[in-house]
Image: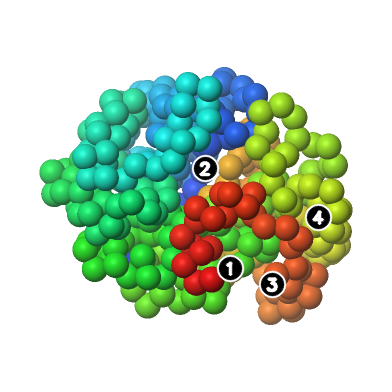
Amino acid sequence: MNTRQLGTSGPRVSAIGLGTMGMSDMYGPSDRAESIATIHAALDAGVNLLDTGDFYGMGHNEMLIAEALRGRSRDDVLLSVKFGALRDPAGGWSGYDARPQAVKNSLAYTLRRLQTEYVDVYRPSRLDPAVPIEDTIGAIAEMVQAGYVRHIGLSEVGAEAIRRAHAVHPIADLQIEYSLLSRGIESEILPVCRELGIGITAYGVLSRGLLGGHWTPGGTGAGDFRSYLPRFSGENLQHNLGLVDALRGIADDKGVSVAQIAIAWVLARGEDILPLVGARRRDRLTEALGALEVQLGADDLAHIEQAIPAGAAAGDRYAAMQMAQLDSETSHA
């Protein structure tokens, strides 16, 4: 497995990480046995970064990972955990809490659910508008000093917040959406991260399945939050699937899948960028890992840029209310 450095202060990680949210939440029903088998297959293939959030399935995802890791060496895996999003018993969302006391409370429960003594990368899931980011990062830094956290990360914050956080404690990486259909970080956020030596952990590299090459209209079922996303609605979806078809032509010429060329494009954007793939099944994982073998030359990249230029996607990546809660989207508006 190829490896990459997760920022100048972070660990070396496999060139592709596994995002596990869909094994517990957001994309409709999942198969527990297949989820665990997929985690095992990822680890066996050399993937050592597992990404989760304490609010994925209200703790279910962390307990699932703990079950999957039973009997394996803790030193062989890096656990990246987001915290701060608040849920209710019905699974609804009720804001964020990144106060210092909430940091430590959330971490205590995470350590117990994951059955581990430390988390490799710990990060607030969003910027809490009621709490200075210096206070949140300072509290995580105390947990680093105490040995409960190895590295500090961020998620979906803008350039100013990145600078303020990094001034308190070195930030290993920023987790943020980045794909052929979501390139908003390129203008301001990515340059700041590179200036400060902060890695990018890119989620949504397949734009939640749009770039997977397997999507069909009407593909969302019960409990699938994509039915609420602008890019999966009406004319937007038809436009975006047209972009995927253009990419499919390039993929076919290279003898690879649409998903593989989309992931390979993210890999080609820089050694400081680490794609997370949200595979819930072993076959999808195998396909995604095949992207590591795809070599994109200058001509390939030019053809891809022509097929899907920056800003080509129709519709925002989240619904309007969620977009308004993203510091990464609003801080430069």
Residue under circle 3?
A: 310
Asked if the residue under mark 3 is in contact with the one under mark 4, i.e. CB atoms within 8 Å, the reply is: no
Residue under circle 2?
A: 19
Sequence-wise, which precedes: disc 1 or disc 2? 2
Residue 128 falls left or right of residue 273: left
x and y percentages locating residue 278 in the rendered image: 58, 42
Residue under circle 1?
A: 184
Label 3 vs label 2: CA separation?
Answer: 25 Å
Vertical order, 72 against 152 (above or below): above
**How many labels, in total?**
4
Q: Amino acid at mark 4?
A: Asn
Q: Residue furthest left?
A: 146
Callout 2 secondary element: strand
Q: Amino acid at mark 1?
A: Gly
Residue in the picture at 15% in, 48% down: 142
Residue in the picture at 50% in, 53% down: 325
Residue under circle 4?
A: 236
Badge 2 crowding class, 10 Å Cα cut-off, few under 14, some 14 to 19, many 20 or more, is many
Sequence-wise, which precedes: disc 4 or disc 1? 1
Vertical order, 206 against 196 (above or below): above
Q: Quadrant of residue 96?
A: top left
